[in-house]
Each structure stands twice: as C-alpha cells, then as structure tokens.
Image (spheres, grey):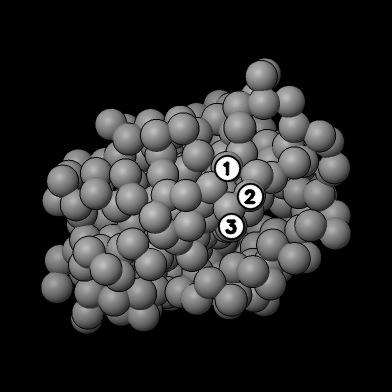
Amino acid sequence: MKLYYDFHIHSCLSPCGDDENTPNNIVNMALIKGLHVIALSDHNTGKNCPAAMAVGKENGLVVLPAMELTTSEDIHILCLFEKYEDLQRLERYIDGRRLKIKNKPEIFGRQRILNERDEPIGEEENLLIVSSGISVEEVASLVKGFDGIPVPAHIDKQANGLVGVLGAFDYTLGFELIESTLDSGVALPRITDSDAHYLWDISEAEHWIEAKSCSAHGVFEALKKMCRQGKG
C-alpha cells in the first residue's frame, strides 16, 4: 500500500522547535495534511516520542520513534527506529558522551517534555543542539547496532549536511539511505522530509513509500527494503 510520510519533525523538546509543536498538535496537523506515517525526531533525544506515539495510535497515525543526532563534525544524522526501546538504548549511550552545556531558554528556546495530553512532565536542562560525541565514522554502525536506520539528513543543504561539511559523500561510512529534497547525485535511495520546526512546515501528502501494512513494523520493513536496494 502507498503510505504518505514525513520522517523528520521536531517537537517543542528541540530548543529550535516551536512551543506549539506538541504531540497532539503534530499528530493532528499530520492527519490534516493527509499523512499516514511520521517520525518525531528531536535533536539528540527521543523523550517526546512516547507521547506522540500514544497520540498517533489513538488517532490512526503511525509514529516512528526517532532522533536527529549531531555528530562530532556537526553533521545531522536522522536515526529511525521501529521500537522506542531501541531508541532509548541509543539515547542512553549518547547521554554518556554528549556535551553537557546548560540550556539558556531565553537564547535557544525551551526544551519541554510532554505527556500524551500535552501536559508538561519535565524539561531538558542541558542544551540538545550540541555534539553527541559520536563521529561520522562510527555513527552508522552504532545506530545499526541498536536496530535503527541511520540517514544523513538534508544532505542537499550546506549547513549540517554530510556533503556540505565533508565536501563529498563518502560511501564507506556505511549509510544506505539518504534524506534530500533535491537530487544530490548520491547513488543511494532517498527519502524527502520537511525537517519541520513549525506545524505549518509539516509535509503535505506528496512523498510516499510502498509498505505491506500501515504499521510501525510495515513502515520499518519498507525502509529496510530501500536500504537493501541501495546495496544492490
């Protein structure tokens, strides 16, 4: 079946994410846009994923747990998972290496953790938009080791994109899928996402994947199939 998606959406937990990007608002906007599946992908954390996944389940929208990891080189890597427990394992690993710099909400924005009713249950004290302490050479194998899919984010952009930072795409790094809006010339399967920091930026029903079922497992299997095609 054809499933319309947006795998790169930030919530109000990302300091650069709008305060209106709550789990309920994100899910409802995705449904209004006609999407079948999304991924919540905050910077270096997945703590708002449980709420978004619960709201999605209640409203018929598949929500994959994810994060946008920042490498030591300031390259953004979208890390997609089928199960939140696997994302948690990656987050715990990163927490031991990530730079610990106190957030200044008045400068960078608040980092709010919400429940499925959009009620605040915590706030991340350390700034999330910093290096995870993971190098680009190790990130692909690390994410795969936690049963995730690592995807170099927005590689057609100069800032924080793998090609923009390194100057070229290095196929030996172990990536099998890329995220790009434009044709980047990289010979790997591609997904196109919004990188939405505001509700109105969430993708319209334009980009789709073919999956056997509208479920987290079905979507994740479809993405893994795309990765295998990239190897071929």
Question: Around disc 3, counting alpha carbons within 10 Å, would you say few (fewer than 14), some (14 to 19), or many (20 or more)?
Answer: many
Of label 3 and label 1, which has the lower sequence position?
A: 3
Report which quarter residue 214 is drawn in. bottom left
What is the quadrant of residue 16 in the picture? Answer: top right
Q: Is residue 45 found left or right of 210 in the rendered image?
A: right
Name the residue rendered at 58%, 53% in the picture: 121
Regarding residue 200, the answer to whether it shows in the image is yes
Kind of residue at disc 1:
Arg
Q: Secondary structure at mark 1?
A: strand
- x, y (%) of residue 62? 30, 66
Quarter of the picture holding the C terminus: bottom left
Vertical relation: 156 (above or below) 10: above
Under circle 3, the secondary element is loop
* Residue beneath disc 2: 122
- Disc tally is 3
Residue at image position (73%, 25%) is: 104
Q: Which residue is mark 3?
A: 47
| Amino acid type of the residue that numbered disc 2 sits on in the rendered structure | Gly
Q: Are marks 2 and 1 in contact (CB under 8 Å)?
A: yes
Q: Is residue 167 left or right of residue 205?
A: right
CB under 8 Å between callouts 3 and 1? no
- Between label 3 and label 1, give the one nearer the viewer: 1
Asked whether 54 or 72 is in front, the reply is 54
Of the numbered discs 3 and 2, the one sitting upstream in the chain is 3
- Camera-side residue: 232 or 207? 207
Q: CA distance from mark 3 to mark 1?
A: 9 Å
Question: Residue 49, labelled with which disc?
Answer: none
Q: Are marks 3 and 2 in contact (CB under 8 Å)?
A: yes
> Where is mark 1, residue-wise?
112
Q: Position of residue 120 (x, y in %)?
A: 53, 47
